[in-house]
């Protein structure tokens, strides 16, 4: 795509949550009539900073607060948004942790919800060391997984 055809930025903010077993939290979702596995997070809203976005997304997705450990990565290459052809994607990743004990369900299998209905979501832990890029649906998440493996191992 030529950059002249791009009309919008799509800014996404994600949380990397690593537990004591070196597992990362994944979100399995059915959105826009597609099943996807990604890191938890979502879209930046106007008037919101990236740090505020990941905190809001955590409240929406987990029903509990998180604190930011560090900024981990911001996209440094061009990525066209997969669902919106006239959008350029910018993704921002933070390492975050829960401020209290988990208050939401974590599954041991992917897509652990009753039906593929838009908006369905479940969470699961995956060992960073053995997580394959192909499990993640999006190119930037796959890149970030590589960075995470380098950082942890």
Image (spheres, rainbow, N blue to C red):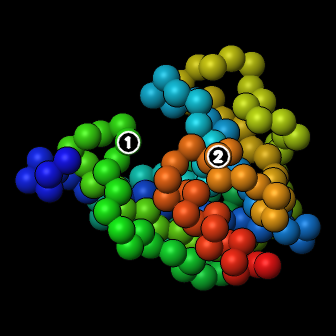
State the SS at label 2: helix
Which residue is more in the foreground, 133 or 88?
Answer: 133
> Which residue carries the number 2 mark?
134
Pick whichever, 103 or 112, lies toward us.
112
Which residue ends up furthest to the right in the rendered image? 21
Q: Position of residue 24 (x, y in %)?
A: 76, 61
The secondary element bearing badge 1 is classed as loop
Q: Residues within 10 Å of mark 1 (few under 14, many from 20)?
A: few
Is residue 7 visible in the rendered structure shown here? no
| Residue at 49 percent of width and 23 percent of height | 33
Q: Look at 59% across and 20% down and name the residue there.
A: 117
Examine the rendered structure and indicate whether residue 102 appears above or below residue 52: above
The answer to whether residue 38 is left or right of residue 100 is: left
Image quadrant in which the C terminus is located: bottom right
Q: Image quadrant of residue 17?
A: bottom right
The residue that disc 1 covers is: 82
Question: Compared to 152, does 130 lie above or below?
Answer: above
Rendered image: mark on residue 5: none
Task: Confirm or deny contact between disc 2 and disc 1 (CB under 8 A).
Answer: no
Q: Is residue 149 left or right of residue 70?
A: right
Q: CA distance from mark 2 to mark 1?
A: 16 Å
Q: What percent of the width, then of the height, locates residue 18? A: 77, 68
Q: Earlier in the sequence, mark 2 or mark 1?
A: 1
């Amino acid at each position: 795509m030529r950059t002249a055809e791009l009309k919008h930025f799509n800014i996404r903010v994600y949380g990397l949550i690593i537990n004591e077993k070196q597992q990362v939290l994944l979100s399995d979702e059915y959105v826009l009539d597609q099943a996807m596995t990604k890191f938890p997070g979502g879209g930046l809203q106007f008037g919101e900073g990236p740090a505020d976005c990941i905190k809001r997304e955590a409240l929406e997705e987990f029903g509990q607060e998180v604190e930011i450990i560090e900024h981990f990565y911001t996209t440094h290459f061009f990525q066209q948004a997969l669902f919106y052809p006239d959008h350029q994607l910018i993704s921002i990743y933070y390492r975050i942790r829960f401020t209290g004990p988990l208050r939401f369900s974590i599954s041991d299998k992917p897509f652990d919800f009753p039906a593929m209905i838009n908006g369905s979501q479940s969470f699961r832990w995956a060992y960073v060391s053995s997580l394959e890029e192909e499990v993640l649906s999006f190119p930037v998440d796959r890149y970030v997984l590589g960075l995470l493996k380098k950082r942890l191992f």
